[in-house]
Amino acid sequence: MSGGITGSITGATRLYAILGDPVAPLRSPALFNAAFARLGRDAAFLPLQVPEGALPEVWAGLRRIGNLDGLVITMPHKAAALPLLDALGPTATLTGTVNTARRRPDGGWEGEMFDGEGFRDGLERAGHTPHGARVLLVGCGAAGRAIGFALARAGVAHLALRDAAPGRAEALAARLAEAFPALPVSTGAAGPEGRDIVVNATPLGLRPGDALPLDPAALRPGQVVADVIPNPEVTPLIAAARRLGCPTVTGRAMHEGQARLAAAYLGIAGWEEGAPG
Amino acid sequence: MSGGITGSITGATRLYAILGDPVAPLRSPALFNAAFARLGRDAAFLPLQVPEGALPEVWAGLRRIGNLDGLVITMPHKAAALPLLDALGPTATLTGTVNTARRRPDGGWEGEMFDGEGFRDGLERAGHTPHGARVLLVGCGAAGRAIGFALARAGVAHLALRDAAPGRAEALAARLAEAFPALPVSTGAAGPEGRDIVVNATPLGLRPGDALPLDPAALRPGQVVADVIPNPEVTPLIAAARRLGCPTVTGRAMHEGQARLAAAYLGIAGWEEGAPG
């Protein structure tokens, strides 16, 4: 028997997993397992529910499991995973966070952060190039940091940062200035006026009744509005932007971009063929 | 999506696993996943390759994983698992080994040993009752110990123990005498003569070119010959016994018996319907 059917997971099946909490709403297991089935690969991708604070202990055990080849790391572990790895990619080092890790031939584990590049990938596949764009990024937490670095690397013309927590936008601006000294970055209570692309990287919109991350009355038709929240796919911000005639990019596009890049990093060839949107 | 298809493992899927090394030849993942698919249960059963000596570290991690509900433990970890659990069943306590563990409602883990009862179950389903039988048990390691206790509990009339390692048969005899003081147990270089049932519980027959665990020339037609080795299913001993006209019970029957009992312990109802042999 080979991959595809749960009944066909055998002793020889190779394992991949996503670590997070909660895991029930995660889309990665279905996405990766559908790819394994399509590719005829004898592998399975599992959700592992790891409570906050338990990662070091869980990770010490997982790294001893010989048929585990790769991991995706999600909330609340993206920063906690960093010091547990033996080697880090450049974006993991810059952002202080990791979302994908793989076993190296020497048995050690290395990790990289693809949230930002996944966002950029989703944006570009939706037809919106960040190169030369003026961007407002609302939210400078883990997701916002990763997106800020990816947008800087993609060559945005100007980046305005905003965060409700005092000092967080300024801290990201300082880190960006070190890595990309030529990029104009501003902080403060700036709105969407004059931006080509407006990004929500806060959790606002995840829960019913959340406040909006920015006032949609300030949006103008033609401005691209992107959101990091994959579920619900249409957040109140995305819905408001669509009513105003703005092109939108949902968190689902970002998540699919992350999954594509994570799959490539994990050596899962052929992901694109027949993959969802 | 619900259980059955690997493509349908989602974030909500509950997990079970077998811990061993090697894992590639293990039959439990295929057996349990086929049962989950048949039962429409949103669960997956995984092979976890855990090298000898790594169990304490792996176990410390696994017990923090919130969606892991049960484990089967196999070579080389059956004795090493014992001190890691929070509670033990009576057979685990008697034999000093564990082959199944489950999460309790309070979050702790408890384990029990079903290898011996699985053997007895396979023997009885093949139509051979150990009650009142005279039995020769060759091999008094972990498997032999478990089988010895199960045969004693089933009410054999006499048990002859043999082991190539000095003192091992005598040690099992002493433990059996404590638990079953009325059972006649003998040790020494006894052969199959006069036995109703002859059991190989040594690893001999696992590898091509292994010596036979006992001289088949001493077998007589009508004696039941049972082997614990599931793969190859027809060991040289089983083949020789069949040529002599002895009824045989293979390691596959024992393994299926263990799996049935482990499934019941893990709360997997409906295992029997449509289950293999």
Image: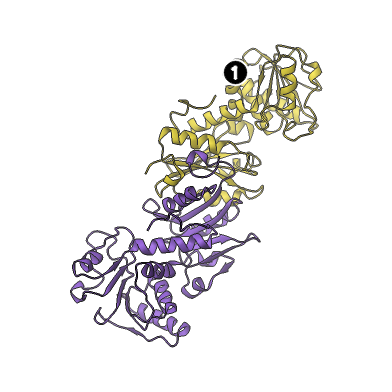
Chain colours: A purple, B yellow
Compared with A268, B132 (above or below) is above
Q: Position of residue A66 (x, y in %)?
A: 61, 51
Residue A238 appears in the figure:
yes
Q: Amino acid at mark 1?
A: Ala
Tell me what residue is drawn at x 38 percent, y 41 percent: B2
Q: The disc numbered 1 marks a residue on which chain?
A: B
Q: Position of residue A80 (x, y in %)?
A: 48, 65
Q: Position of residue A150 (x, y in %)?
A: 43, 74
Residue topped by disc 1 = B126
Tell me what residue is drawn at x 52 percent, y 53 percent: A16
Q: Position of residue A186 (x, y in %)?
A: 34, 85
Tell me what residue is drawn at x 66 percent, y 33 percent: B231
Residue B185 appears in the figure:
no
**Seen in the image, is A180 located left or right of residue A199?**
right
Instruction: Write down the quadrant of residue A125 in the picture.
Output: bottom left
Instruction: Write down the quadrant of residue A162 in the picture.
Output: bottom left
Looking at the rendered structure, the secondary structure element under dot 1 is loop
Compared with A145, A27 (above or below) is above
Instruction: Write down the quadrant of residue A167 in the picture.
Output: bottom left
Tell me what residue is drawn at x 32 percent, y 69 percent: A202
Mark 1: few, some, or many residues within 10 Å (few <14, many ≥20)?
A: some
